[in-house]
Image (tube, rainbow, N blue to C red):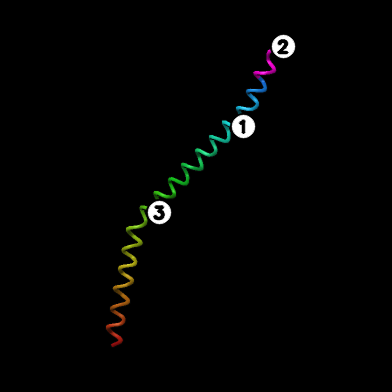
Amino acid sequence: MLWLMPIAILFASVVPLVALLVRLKGEVGRTTGELRQCAALRPALVEIGQDARALQEEVRRRIR
């Protein structure tokens, strides 16, 4: 029975480490997904910025 103690101690120290690694992997995956979404939004944001500048120029022309 005494030979089970090192195995129990090893198991007790490995389980929280594995749980932490799984949680970190989930966080990294979620962050990577968020970065991909931001990258996908960039062209639309650039287009909105261009439209806003064009509208601003049109307003300035009409005011003159």
Q: Is residue 27 left or right of residue 35?
A: right
Mark nearer the N terminus (3 vs 1): 1
Q: Is residue 59 left or right of residue 14?
A: left
Q: Which image quadrant for residue 2?
A: top right
Mark nearer the N terminus (3 vs 2): 2
CA gap between label 3 and label 2 equals 56 Å
Q: Residue at x 28, y 84 (%)?
A: 62
Q: Which residue is mark 1?
A: 16
**Mark identifier at residue 38:** 3
10 Å crowding of disc 2: few (<14), some (14-19), many (20+):
few
**Mark identifier at residue 1:** 2
Helix, strand or loop: magenta stretch: helix
Q: Residue at x 60, y 27 (%)?
A: 14
Q: Is residue 31 left or right of residue 52?
A: right
- Provide the residue span drawn in magenta: 2-7
Q: Residue at x 62, y 32 (%)?
A: 16
Establish if 27 lies above or below 11.
below
Task: Say which element carries label 2.
Answer: loop
